[in-house]
Image (cartoon, rainbow, N blue to C red):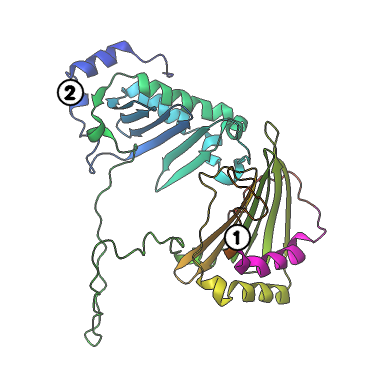
Amino acid sequence: MLPGSLRTHGLVVFLLGISSHAQARPPFSDPAAPSFIVRLQRNQSDKNVCAIVRGDGMFHVESETTNHFEASEGTLDDTELADLNAVLRNSDLAALRQKKITSPLVMTEKDEFVLSILRSPLTQDLVFMNRESRRPFDSFINPLLRWLDALQHHAHTSLGEFVGRNNCLPPKKPEFSRRQELPSSVEAPSVPNMSPGKDDSLSRSSGVAPTGSQEAMFLMRWNVNHIANGAVQDTCVVVYPSGRYHMEKSAQGSHEKLKLHTFEDTLQAADLEQLEGLLNEPKLKSSTHRNLAEGKIFREGEMTTLDVPREGHVQQLSFANYFGIPGWVSNVNAGTDPEERIVTPLRKWLDSHIKAKNEAALQNAVPTRCIPQQ
């Protein structure tokens, strides 16, 4: 049964609480309850909504505007649940990957759609930044948007904000890994005395520790984003340990389509060695500089970011320069980032060894923002 034609009889039964099928369901917050099958989230300028549906049909919805929050829970009947599962089983939807979704440089309106579907044992996670990024996939994404709307209007039980707010995240079971037994001849390491909040190894600003094959997944990722007169120009480069690299040059003005040129090639061994030397310069390697453009108002700006896998983490650096800042008498040096000098040698190297190459652009390329690909 499609959203918008939900059966009244099943809804009345749920509201009265006389359905033994509904009463048999454990609370949504119970970690032992059935796994979720889909989580939907839509963020717009005037309203944010999220919903999550369990395998037994029970759902949780949260809706928030500037001055109102509402959380509710209800249950889909068997026919509704089957209809939702049919939408999730769409073969084109199941095959879609994030790298196939275009991310615009300029967005005239906020309309983000986030989707997570359980594809046992993993989840399929997709993010559509705005309406235009969804348009090529309307045939199987629009039904999910209709389901998000239908869940908000389905028969439900309202929850208080402090009880119901959980960002529509599934409950987690506490899991403990077994400690590896040490040989009797090896002394167990001592545990340092750390007070709460002192250990930031899981939330350090330099990134998340890579594991397994991810540790050498890429050598570096570089991105320069220039904003002026309502238009954005973006250049990014990702280089892999083999010397292979991927570069994208994109541009987009207000109410214009994204223009993209993509290039790929492989560095010579000597060039790769030079790049590794620049990335391991002591001042760059030890830097933790983070300067982003959040909350800034300016006429023209340029943001530069650099990601480099290090031992046990990914070093993430960012640099920002602003011009035409309101209230500044002189705009010559207004808002410049003095720490950017530590990546100046790297910038010059990339300009001369990668950006200056006269390569032919790839045909029918899809923008990836140079996110490392396995």
Magenta segment's dominant SS is helix
Tell me the distance, in whole angstroms, between the alpha carbons under discs 1 and 2.
56 Å
Q: Nearer the viewer, residue 318 or 33?
A: 318
Say which quarter of the image contains residue 5.
top left
Task: Name the secondary structure under disc 2.
Answer: helix
Residue type at numbered disc 1? Arg
Point out the residue furthest to the top here.
8
User: Callout 2, which amino acid?
Assistant: Ser
In terms of depth relative to the viewer, which is nearer, 348 or 114?
348
The answer to whether residue 373 shows anywhere in this view is no
User: As displayed, is residue 344 above or below residue 166?
Assistant: below
**353 within the magenta span:** yes
| The C terminus sits in image quarter | bottom right
Q: Position of residue 245 (x, y in %)?
A: 68, 61
Residue at 61% in and 57% down: 336
Front position in the image: 333 or 176? 333
Q: Name the residue under label 2.
A: 20
Please say whether residue 355 is one of the residues in the magenta stretch: yes
- Residue 248: x %, y % from top left: 69, 52
The residue nearer to you, when weighing 95 against 373, is: 373
Q: How packed is label 1: few (under 14 Cα within 10 Å), some, or many (20 or more)?
A: many
Residue drawn at 63 percent across, 38 percent down:
106
Residue located beneath label 1 in the image? 221
| Helix, strand or loop at mark 1 | strand
Magenta stretch, residue numbers: 340-360
Q: How many marks?
A: 2
Q: Which of marks 1 and 2 is nearer the N terminus?
A: 2
In what quadrant of the picture does the N terminus appear?
top left
Residue at the (44%, 65%) spot, across then down:
211
| Discs 1/2, front | 1
